[in-house]
Image (cartoon, helix red, strand yellow):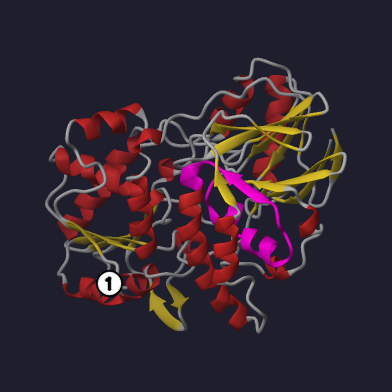
Amino acid sequence: MKLTFYGGAGRVTGANYLLESGETKILIDCGLRQGGNFAEVENFNPFPYHPEEIAAVFITHAHIDHIGRVPKLIRDGFKGMVYSTPPTKDFSEFLLLDSEHLLSREAERQNKPPLYTVEHVRTALEQWKGIPYHKAMEVGPFKIQFYNAGHILGSSFIRIEAEGKSIVFSGDLGNSPAPIIPESENLPQVDYCLIESTYGDRVHENTDARREELEDAIEDVVKAQGTLLIPAFAMERTQDLIYHINALVEEGRIPKVRVFVDSPLAIKLTEVYGKYKDYFDEEAKRLLHSGDDILNFKGLTLTLTTEESKEINDVPPPKVIIAGSGMSQGGRILHHEMRYLPDPKSMLLIVGYQTEGSLGRRLLSGELKTIKIMGTEVPVRAEIRSIQSFSAHADQPRLLEWIKSCGCHLKKVFVVQGDGEPSRVLAEKIKKDLGMEAVVPEENQIVEL
């Protein structure tokens, strides 16, 4: 087999791996490269391979940095099938349509043709098939199985076998235990492994603390009579927050406060959760069986329309506003930040990864006195706080534990989907602690397995 790293090498985003055996070529993930902008200029470059020669694409999960260029692949001549778990397919429909809207605006700013159109998204979905966990399938000489990665609902790591050799692509691994999502499965027997390293150099805060920290933030804002702003990714993070606030409400641990989810995309994705309760963990199933609507509570308001979003301004504080985007790179959160960042009674609570160069990362630094949002200078007087334990990515100890869980000695581990330092640190840790060969591949590097 021959493996080429066309994305996700030396960076968190843009996962895209080409695997070849004989004349058959398959892709694992085809993600958007993200950074200071929603989409980096290089996304508009031609693919470094011929899309029409690709037999199939296998998707680990529905985040845009893993699916965001699939419609472009269609546009450029791909005629094969796309495979993922059923929830991933359903989530991808909404996420790709939302992405198309943002990418079209990006293309206009760059004076370029759009990366793809709504029609390309529709065609991709027609060529997309949902495959349950553990169901074996074949494409040419390749035998493929999806396993639960514990990252978001329906997320997978993928085991592929050919020529008597086997390899796993980790996708993104979950920060278990997490709300609603079952823990990631153990790594099966395998020869080679690609492992993500977003937090390869870090140890997360205790996950048990996240609900307490969220409780503290809500209580502090209510006491100050301010507004709590939470930039949140529409997929997974918003549902996590609703789940935890529901528990705080049910247990009487926070004062009565209006909570707004101001994200049409998050609202649509939350509805998809309702279709796939069989994919929930046992605790979520138990709560549902007991009659607890885990993604709804008294005081929660979902604002779909622009008019409903504007009406949030008329609700006096205290209040909580959860809105996209998660890195403050666009979406409705920007309008709320313009309005409430100047208010010293209010708080911006960051609960997700903030990529280098993003507005969220600059706000998280805590050093800004003013910030430009949509061309307007906005004073930053609100408190900036973060909860790191909300991350949906495994930290270094969990990544090492997952590698060890196969109970075998891997021939080689490829450390991917991380910035330079986290990837390097994790590779060194794998070599030192596990005695396995671990490397950080470079973009466009070709490896013979």
Q: x and y percent of residue 293 in the render?
A: 21, 42
Residue 13 appears in the rendering: yes
Q: Give the range drawn in magenta.
A: 61-88
Q: x and y percent of residue 414 in the render?
A: 74, 36
Vertical relation: 382 (above or below) 441? below
Q: Which amino acid does label 1 sit on?
A: Ser
Residue drawn at (35%, 44%) of the image: 275
Q: Does the magenta stretch include residue 65?
A: yes
Query: Mark 1 highlights which residue?
Result: 309
Residue drawn at (46%, 68%) of the image: 368
Residue drawn at (56%, 46%) of the image: 129
Vertical relation: 192 (above or below) 392? above
Q: How crowded is mark 1: few (under 14 residues within 10 Å), some or many (20 or more)?
A: many
Query: 375 or 41, which lies in front?
Result: 41
Mark 1 lies on a secondary structure that is: helix
Q: x and y percent of residue 148 in the render?
A: 52, 32
Query: 238 or 265, which lies in front?
Result: 265
Residue 253 appears in the rendering: no
Q: x and y percent of residue 241 in the render?
A: 32, 48
Q: Quadrant of residue 186?
A: top right
Residue 357 lies left or right of residue 350; in this view the side is right
Q: Quadrant of residue 144?
A: top right
Q: In which quarter of the image is residue 131?
A: top right
Query: 54 or 210, which lies in front?
Result: 54
Q: Does the magenta stretch include residue 176?
A: no
Residue 80 lies left or right of residue 260; in this view the side is right
Residue 96 lies left or right of residue 12; in this view the side is left
Vertical relation: 194 (above or below) 13? above
Numbered disc total: 1
Residue 316 lies left or right of residue 29; in this view the side is left
Q: Quadrant of the N terminus?
A: top right
Q: Quadrant of the C terminus?
A: top right
